[in-house]
Amino acid sequence: MSPDRRRHARIAFASPAFLLVNADEIPVRLLDISLKGALVELPPGVALRRGAATLLRIDLGQDDQQIRIEASIAHLEDRLVGVACHTMDIDSATLLRRLVELNLGNPELVDRELSALISTQGPKP
């Protein structure tokens, strides 16, 4: 996806991460993350399909803290996979917000991003 189409700031962040697809837990390399998704690198020999439902689990290494994001595979390019966030629990959302806030260095930018995210998702039926 071209940078001009993105509405959410992406931050580079290295941490152990896993994609859970069907019954498979795939270790991935987290390249960057935003409030709306992530870019990960698959290990060699792993193939996924666009649109597949997945759970992205990011281990933060402190007190067993994890960010767990229910997502789908948005795009694939060689071993790079764009993961689109759909939902997450409140603890994961809080951790992700803090992570983005610390890396952007400006809480107002995070508030603006969260407002945009909330307005694009709207109420669920």
Image (cartoon, grey):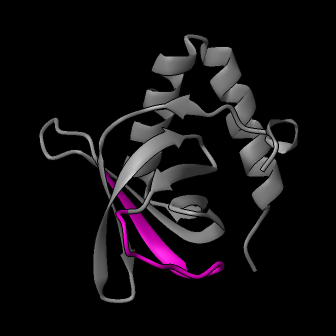
- Residue sitting at the far right: 4
- Residue 53, given in percent of the width and then of the height, sits at 54, 80
Front residue of this view, candidates 86 and 73: 73
Q: Residue at x 62, y 34 (%)?
A: 10
The answer to whether 38 is drawn above or below residue 88 in the figure is above
Q: In which quarter of the image is residue 11?
A: top right
Q: Which residue is drawn at 37% across and 75% down?
A: 45
Magenta stretch in the rendered image: 43-58
The answer to whether 98 is drawn above or below residue 117 in the figure is above
**Horizontal arrangement in the rendering, residue 21 relative to residue 80 (left or right):** left
- Residue 36, given in percent of the width and then of the height, sits at 64, 50
Q: In which quarter of the image is residue 15?
A: top left
Front residue of this view, candidates 29 and 7: 29
**Horizontal arrangement in the rendering, residue 23 relative to residue 53 (left or right):** left
The answer to whether 37 is drawn above or below residue 18 in the figure is above
- Residue 42, given in percent of the width and then of the height, sits at 41, 62
Residue 10 lies in magenta, yes or no?
no
- Residue sitting at the far top: 105
- Residue 120, given in percent of the width and then of the height, sits at 82, 54
Q: In which quarter of the image is residue 81?
A: bottom right
Residue 53 lies in magenta, yes or no?
yes
Q: Which residue is drawn at 65% across and 80% down?
A: 51
Q: What secondary structure is the stretch in magenta mostly built from?
A: loop
Front residue of this view, candidates 39 and 99: 39
Q: Which residue is drawn at 41% across and 46% down?
A: 30
